[in-house]
Image: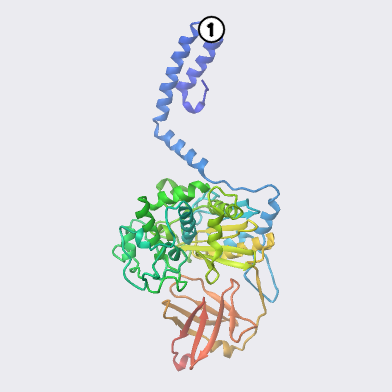
Amino acid sequence: MKCNPLHGLFLHLACNQENSFSAKFKNNSNMNKYILLLSLLSVMASAAVAKSPQNISRITDAKQQEERWQCHTALHAEGRKSKVENSIMPHVVFDGKIKANSIQSEMRKLKLPAFSVAVIHNGQLDWSDAWGQLEANGTPVDCGSLFQAGSLAKPATVLAALRLKAAKKIDFDKNIENYLASYELPAGQQNKTHPVTFRNLLTHTSGLTAGGYGGYAQKVQLPSDQQIVRGEAPSNTSKVSVENEPGTSLVYSGGGYTVVEIALQDHLNQDFNQIMNQWLLRPIGMKQADFSVPLAKSKHLYTARGHQIDGTVVPGGWHNHPEQAAAGLWATATDMAMLLIEMHKGFKGESEVFTKASILELISKPIENHAFGFRMMGQGDDVFITHYGGTMGYQAGMTLNLRTGDGAVYLSNANHGSNLGAAFLRAVSRTYDWSVFKEENVQRLKLPSKILKSLTGTYTFPDQGWQMHVTLENGDLRFEFPDGNRLPLVMTAIQGRPLEFAHETGVHAYFKDKESIMHIQLFGQIGQRLEISPSEK
């Protein structure tokens, strides 16, 4: 019997007794009686220990700790890791002036509570790390801390669906109605020759309503998938409809992925979390990734809380996303790195999870440089497939070169975490000599104050419901968003197109006077200035 001080005094005395008796009665037939007695005492003591609530909690905590990812640095990777950590630079470099920063310094500058990353090199995990706190000024994060991964749930859903297709469980090109039992798509632009299918739903070409999901605050009643797509209470989204003929245009649609979610559950008679565990998470070894809604309370102790731009915590810590296929994934950076590594293996024909045909199908027919939601960046064989995600209080991103097996993942717990995420990818690119995610070098242009002032005012973006104030600030323009969902931007005039401005994060803006109304192009959208009074001119 092994003596363990954690078993308590009673069993400790029994252990000492066993040792004493063993020495005194060695080779004595009576020893068996003592051994039997001591074994019974051991069982009784162990049972008492097992029933202790404190001990149950200790065992549970230890088990969870064992199952969590630890930070990792591969042999000879320390130099690369240090270089990435200390070479954070802006997207736009003005006049060739470059000043590198560290990840932790940039976090303090941005007031970003937590940042977790993983870097892949030659198809292997090169290193992973995490900085900051689960909540501002709270418990430190580590590589086993969970973050909401937002729309990174979508490529995970795609890859599970590709496995189901390879197993002949579903057909990507059949009418989706063949798989729907609890819901029927409303009549729209779909027809017999252009039906809604798994393929066009997963590639965002189904013609379904555009848009994403805001999630639901804690303790708010969650709608069913069917209520979500029907736009029925307590859903906070509008009804899904087929607005364009399927297969004719690329339009990002979170609703399309909820239809996929319903179809898979109806067809396989399992809930979505079970499907993803069986067909993706467990086979790959994404040991902490979780599609549960709501997230189990046992995981809250190591879950990063979401933060808004003003630094406050999202009420309740985070929003719940019953739209699991679109936005319901919780993960660590290492979990997502395991997914990318397995995709690289599949591309090489060396995966036991993904067939080579499945991975080739994923990238074989890109539409406007997008493949099943992945953005394809680069030229020829040197292409990185990239996907981003964001929910209330979280930003995430991941990229992979299928050919070389180089890639990276970042997760953050703030609405503006993508600013550091993009800088991190540039630092990785510089360190590992990638062809994408590079800095942009521009030259400042000093414009007269009269011209700058002529651009100020309030601009509206009717299609997006945005409003933005433009003011003059020390020879630059300041863009401020009253709704608070974006950080203010100080935009500098640069040489290039007329009236072109840039921000160090890579945001560009273009002004143009059309029919005596000043217009602005920003974030790929067009806004126009509200009429200003003569006194403001």
Residue 115 visible to an observer of this rendering? no
Q: Determine the residue located farthest toward the front in the rendered image.
A: 193
Give how far across and how far down residue 132 sits, in percent. Answer: 55, 55
Q: In the depicted view, which residue is nearer to us: 481 or 390?
A: 390
Give how far across and how far down residue 5 sits, in percent. Answer: 51, 26
Give how far across and how far down residue 484 sits, in percent. Answer: 45, 71
Q: Determine the residue located farthest toward the left in the rendered image.
A: 233
Give the residue at x 36% y 69%: 192
Question: Which structural element holds mark 1?
Answer: loop
Q: Is residue 528 above or below residue 55?
A: below
Please name the amino acid that badge 1 sits on.
Phe
- Disc tally is 1
Q: Is residue 378 above or below residue 497?
A: above
Give how far across and how far down residue 280 sits, in percent. Answer: 48, 51
Identify residue for label 1.
25
Left/right placement of residue 182 relative to residue 64 reads: left
Left/right placement of residue 151 relative to residue 446 reads: left
Q: In the depicted view, which residue is nearer to us: 27 or 124?
A: 124
Give the residue at x 43% y 18%: 41
Q: Residues within 10 Å of mark 1 (few under 14, many from 20)?
A: few
Residue 162 visible to an observer of this rendering? yes
Give the residue at x 52% y 52%: 332
Dividing the picture into quadrants, the one containing residue 391 is bottom left
